[in-house]
Amino acid sequence: KSFRGSGARSKARVSYVLAAEHTKLESTADTTHGSMHAFCRLTDVTRRYSGVWSETLRLRGATGQQIVSNGGKCVDSWWANTVRKTNRLAKRQARNFLSQHQAKAKENNEKKMSPRIESSKAGSDSCEAVVIDDSSDSEREGNATASVASAAHLLEKDAHADAEKAELAASTADEAIPTSKAAFKKHPLYAVPSILNQTEVIHPSGKKRVVGIFKGELVYRRTDVSTALTAKKWLYQGRKVKDAELPKPAKKVKARQKPAPKTFKALTSYGVSDNTEQKVDDAAIEEEYDGMDKLYGKWQTDQWSPPSVGPNDTIPVNEYRNVEKALMNPGLVHLELTRISQVAKKLGIPYAPCLLGFEGHRGNRTPTIRGIVVHEHNADLLREAHTEWESQAVEQEHEQRRKAVYKRWKRLIVGILTKERLERQYGDCE
């Protein structure tokens, strides 16, 4: 890429810009000559040279939804893993180099502590000299010392690298505001209220951090955009809308028309007996519905978990008189056995159908109801009764199958005998 302009760098559309820091280390492990080791540390500096970071992400293959959901982070996991593994390999090699150098330095120190004696003879005269230190390799050792410092620099926490990461993040945060409304839709940094999705709202604190104006609309940071859900959907996220916030939804949207039930029809009670009867709060079912869904932000919710259900408490059910497995209360057990509801009803044990989820796609989604939900203290009793009931049912089915086989054989034999009788009586009339 070419960058235009004098004095100032002109940013262009780029997909990858990589900075490589090469380091050559000289080892003194060999007594005759040193050996060279090359290391390379990589840094992704694309943010510094990219004019529009969202365009860079698109060049890397990211979709608009991925750009928004990841908050402007790179979606190429393979790229981040490659850079990280390369730097990890460089650190491993530098660590091995330092360990070898330390071992060699220790060996050299031991040799220096024990002087060697060299003798020279000239004719009949002999001379002995004690060698304390040999500095013939001082230059090579100086290079090795510099190499050790470079290897240690690779291993220690690099403050310059951290500052560089902060600089790259700041350069992305200072990206210019888009000049078209279409660019705001999938932009990782900026958003305007008119392009938000149906379930997105501006956080109240974010309205104090306006970054600009675009065609009369206030521009906000994408980080100030929050997800808004209905009170029921927040329960699946482990949160519950505060009672004081229920009359003050963050947003109202038109609700999708609910189709009329075709197959499943809820009964008024399950597990009917003389002492127990399931009851539903009809006031919640008959709640006024104006055709609008009330959406609430996360700041309007608190952490929540389903309340525990005691042995003598009734099984809490929803407006369709079943229990959703995702919201099942502690103290209840889901039993997914064949015809377990018949066993529970015969024993007079209270139960409720279990809603596992929904199947289908688009507008044709049907509930998946399988198994029942009972109190925890009744689970073992039901399992044992179901085992006994299943064994009896198998015997009954076997007996019914045997009777059906005998009945078919009887019909076949009677038919054959009747045919022979008719042939004997009327076969000679022709």
Image: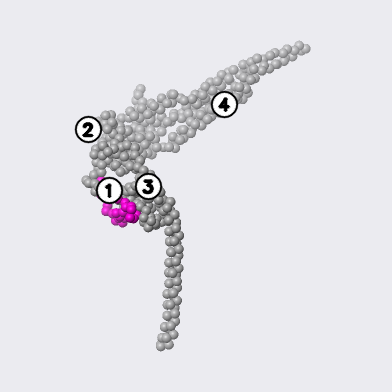
**Which residue is depicted at the point 37% across and 29% down?**
169
Give percent across and percent down for residue 354: 36, 51
Give the SS element for disc 4.
Answer: helix
Query: Can you see residue 318?
Result: yes
Give the SS element for disc 1.
Answer: loop
User: Quadrant of the image for the C terminus?
Assistant: bottom left
**Which residue is depicted at the point 31% across and 56% down?**
263
Query: In the shown orientation, is residue 289 left or right of residue 74?
Result: left
Give percent across and percent down for residue 192: 27, 35
Q: Judge depth for marks 2 and 3 and give the one in front.
A: 3
Residue labelled with disc 1: 281
**Which residue is depicted at the point 46% across and 33% down?**
83
Residue labelled with disc 4: 99
Residue labelled with disc 3: 311
State the CA–CA distance, disc 3 to disc 1. 20 Å
**Circle 3: residue type:** Pro
**Circle 1: residue type:** Asp
